[in-house]
Amino acid sequence: MNVLWRTILVIIAARRRRRREGALEAHDVSRVRVTTLPTDLDILWHMNNGRYLSLADLGRWDLLIRTGLFDAMRQHGWYAVVSSETVTFRKSLRLWQRFTVESRFMGFDDRALFLEHRIVVAGEIYARIIVRARVLRRSGGTVPHDELFATLGAPETIPGIDDWIHDWAQASALPSTRRPAPSVWK
């Protein structure tokens, strides 16, 4: 439940910052300050590994709102879903430790947008999260990139994504929802 309250606070703050400071460009880095709370901890008294992904959502909300992408998506009846993500940890976050969630768009391929989130303490990366997301219509179906970019403008300032990200996306993909995906262990 505390992630819900944090999300609401981030949304309010992001809207204020956008009005006060202007919109972020597609290539800009969004930053959200966060503190490790008792509800973020696991039995070993450091932040639970799953909580990193939940708190990366805060950075994604801030980035979507401050770039204007969220308002444009809402206007067209679109929404984004995470289709895959991976996280790499370097150091643990402890109780009451302050950190920053840094977020940016990495690029896109023919089906998805890619984002990077970093968990940073005093300029040092503690964890890195790569997210693959798709934009869907509330009425059903995927929004093609040409339609998305025609509406929002072409993201000329977003750099191309590295080959390893393409390889990761392909290797971690599950079958489409139109094909069977039986759970069979080998």
Image (spheres, helix red, strand yellow):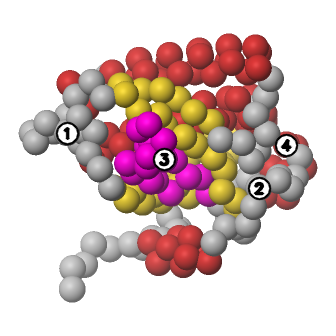
Q: In the rendered view of the protein, which quadrant contains the C terminus?
A: bottom left
| Pick the front one: 39 or 101 | 101
Q: CA distance from mark 2 to mark 3?
A: 17 Å
- The 10 Å Cα crowd at callout 3, few under 14, some 14 to 19, many 20 or more, is many
Which residue is the site of mark 2? 158
Residue 121 is inside the magenta segment: yes
Residue contact at pointers 4 and 3, CB within 8 angstroms: no
Kindly tell me whether residue 138 is visible in this rendering: no
Q: Which residue is mark 1?
A: 46
Magenta residues (range): 114-130
Instruction: From the image, tell me which residue sits under label 4.
Output: 152
Along the polypeptide, which appears first: circle 4 or circle 1? 1
**Looking at the picture, which amino acid does disc 1 mark?**
His
* Quadrant of the rendered image containing residue 114: bottom right
Is residue 92 something one can see in this rendering?
A: yes
Q: Amino acid at mark 4?
A: Leu
Q: Nearer the viewer, residue 139 or 156?
A: 156
Label number found at residue 36:
none
Q: Of marks 2 and 3, which one's residue comes earlier in the chain?
A: 3
